[in-house]
Image (spheres, rainbow, N blue to C red):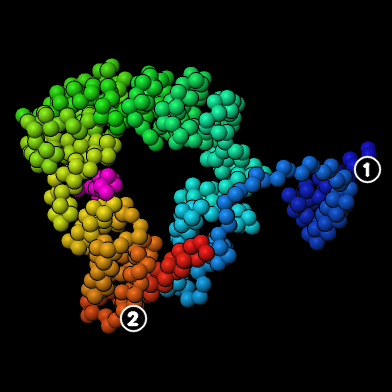
């Protein structure tokens, strides 16, 4: 037996003694007691390490591709390091679930990244690893973090398995070819990694939207189903009737998910043939005289993306009806209802006695969102001051938030401001989340006034923590001065929750501090 074999046998004996316990090991040996076992293991470990032969040096990696973008100003780079470390500074709260009066820096990191992106900066080289770690931990940061990390981030991601997620969303660490060079585009499309092909398809789509489906068609039949689905989803950007023939062909795809996505995209094009087929089916079911849902889900409906089996708790005919109305172009209803506009159509008690109105309105809501139709969205939203349950379209705050996203930014903010003034903040969280940041003008004032009213009323303060956190990230920093007066601890009303006044004062102090920090961040990022 060689020396190496003898050493291996001794190590196995030590492992056996550790597993069994020294008190159960008979016959003494090198591990007669726990102390002796540990000493023997330490000696043996040193011997094994000393006997290892060093491996040959690997070749150095190629340098990272250059990133021509400027680095942010020095003060902004220091701020990024602080945000990535998540330090809150002095004055942070103690236990008990209270956050204290110091800003939450981790929640400001997305805003720093967005502002840096607008200025066209690259990440400071020393902070790229920390930036990739942050993006790994928080998927919401990935698009902006990877854009800031740029070619250096992709270069590093190829060397660390923990950062491989970056390669799935970028160009695989390499540069994309000129989209005006057909041979280079074709070569990368046929030979590149999946991440490179995704990035290339996006670049081609941005340069010439109609060229993207042409590129897809060259390899479509040989692509995996999951890849076909992702490629198809990339056509949402720049979707137009030029994509119709490719999407129509995809309706016959062997993957159900691909067929469903193709049908959804076609229904978002009111002039498409699929939208026309859906309109014909929908108007046959819905009219001034009432609602007659489809009696069956035929082959044509299946091919056009209608899912036959309803989810638990839904009737088949109601399920089919909702899908037909959702996919039909909203323009078909004006003629069906004798020239009435969306607001007048929505106000009609269509088949209310049979209970179809709610189903119909929910489908119209989904259609307005899919087709990005602001006129129908206004009709379905109704006045913001009306109680949600009495609205013409839907009482669901999630659906109302989606409808609001189809409205122009200013109109959206005005609608939500009116909602807050009429109903307070308890139901406004989802609606505030779709408003453009920063909240300025009427919306910012409505939120601050509603918080002040809640404070004066002695309301249970912790129930407003979500809105307060949103306000820290979204209020216009210029509101800090107006909020200063609310940072003092007020006298508690007799019926207030215990400790409410101190909590409100602390929350407003943190809000003011955060707004001022955001103002400083934006100032630091401004190019000299």
* Crowd band around label 2 with a 10 angstrom C-alpha radius: few (<14), some (14–19), many (20+): some
N-terminal-most mark, 1 or 2: 1
* Numbered badge on residue 3: 1
Q: Quadrant of residue 102?
A: bottom left
Residue 21 in percent (x, y) is at 75, 53
Q: Residue at x 42, y 23 (%)?
A: 255
Asked whether 155 falls inside the magenta stretch, the response is no
Q: Quadrant of residue 23?
A: bottom right
Q: CA distance from mark 1 to mark 2?
A: 78 Å
Residue 301 in percent (x, y) is at 27, 21
Q: Residue at x 61, y 48 (%)?
A: 67
Compared with 524, 231 (above or below) is above
Tell me which segment is drawn in magenta: 394-408
SS state under label 2: loop
Compared with 330, 35 (above or below) is below
Residue 320: tell me if it is visible. no
Residue 323 in percent (x, y) is at 25, 30
Q: Residue at x 48, y 62 (%)?
A: 526
Q: Which residue is mark 2?
A: 488
Determine whether, in the image, residue 385 is placed left or right of residue 473. Answer: left
Q: Nearer the viewer, residue 182 or 17?
A: 182
Q: Residue at x 56, y 43 (%)?
A: 166
Compared with 417, 355 (above or below) is above
């Amino acid at each position: 037996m060689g020396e190496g074999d003898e050493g291996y046998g001794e190590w196995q004996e030590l492992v056996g003694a550790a597993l069994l316990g020294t008190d159960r090991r008979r016959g003494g040996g090198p591990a007669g007691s726990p102390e002796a076992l540990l000493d023997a293991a330490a000696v043996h470990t040193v011997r094994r390490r000393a006997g290892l032969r060093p491996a040959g040096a690997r070749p150095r990696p190629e340098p990272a591709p250059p990133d021509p973008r400027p680095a942010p100003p020095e003060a902004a780079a220091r701020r990024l390091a602080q945000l990535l470390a998540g330090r809150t500074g002095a004055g942070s709260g103690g236990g008990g679930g209270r956050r204290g009066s110091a800003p939450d820096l981790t929640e400001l990191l997305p805003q720093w990244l967005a502002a840096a992106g607008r200025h066209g900066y690259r990440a400071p080289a020393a902070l790229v690893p920390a930036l990739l770690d942050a993006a790994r931990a928080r998927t919401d940061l990935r698009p902006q973090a990877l854009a800031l990390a740029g070619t250096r981030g992709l270069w590093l991601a190829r060397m660390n398995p923990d950062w491989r997620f970056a390669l799935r969303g970028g160009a695989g660490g390499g540069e994309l070819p000129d989209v005006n060079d057909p041979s280079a585009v074709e070569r990368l499309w046929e030979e590149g990694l999946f991440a490179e092909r995704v990035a290339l398809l996006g670049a081609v789509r941005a340069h010439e939207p109609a060229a993207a489906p042409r590129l897809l068609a060259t390899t479509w039949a040989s692509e995996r189903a999951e890849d076909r689905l992702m490629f198809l989803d990339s056509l949402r950007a720049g979707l137009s009737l030029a994509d119709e023939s490719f999407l129509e062909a995809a309706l016959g795809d062997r993957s159900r998910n691909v067929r469903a996505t193709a049908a959804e995209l076609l229904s978002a094009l009111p002039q498409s043939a699929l939208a026309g087929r859906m309109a014909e089916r929908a108007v046959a079911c819905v009219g001034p005289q009432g609602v007659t849902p489809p009696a069956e889900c035929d082959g044509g409906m299946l091919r056009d993306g209608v899912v036959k089996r309803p989810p638990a708790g839904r009737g088949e005919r109601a399920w089919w009806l909702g899908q037909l109305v959702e996919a039909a172009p909203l323009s078909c209803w004006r003629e069906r209802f004798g020239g009435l506009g969306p607001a007048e159509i929505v106000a009609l008690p269509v088949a209310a006695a049979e209970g179809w109105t709610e189903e119909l309105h929910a489908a119209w809501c989904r259609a307005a969102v899919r087709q990005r139709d602001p006129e129908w969205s206004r009709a379905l939203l109704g006045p913001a001051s009306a109680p949600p349950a009495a609205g013409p379209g839907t009482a669901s705050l999630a659906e109302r938030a989606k409808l609001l996203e189809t409205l122009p930014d200013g109109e959206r903010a005005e609608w939500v401001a009116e909602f807050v003034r009429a109903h307070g903040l308890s139901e406004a969280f989802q609606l505030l989340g779709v408003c453009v940041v920063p909240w300025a003008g009427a919306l910012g004032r409505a939120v601050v006034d509603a918080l002040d009213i809640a404070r004066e009323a002695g309301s249970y303060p912790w129930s407003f923590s979500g809105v307060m956190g949103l306000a820290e990230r979204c209020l216009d920093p210029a509101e800090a001065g107006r909020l200063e007066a609310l940072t003092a601890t007020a006298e508690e009303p007799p019926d207030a929750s215990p400790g409410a006044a101190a909590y409100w004062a602390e929350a407003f102090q943190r809000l003011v501090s955060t707004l001022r920090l955001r103002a400083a961040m934006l100032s630091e990022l401004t190019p000299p």
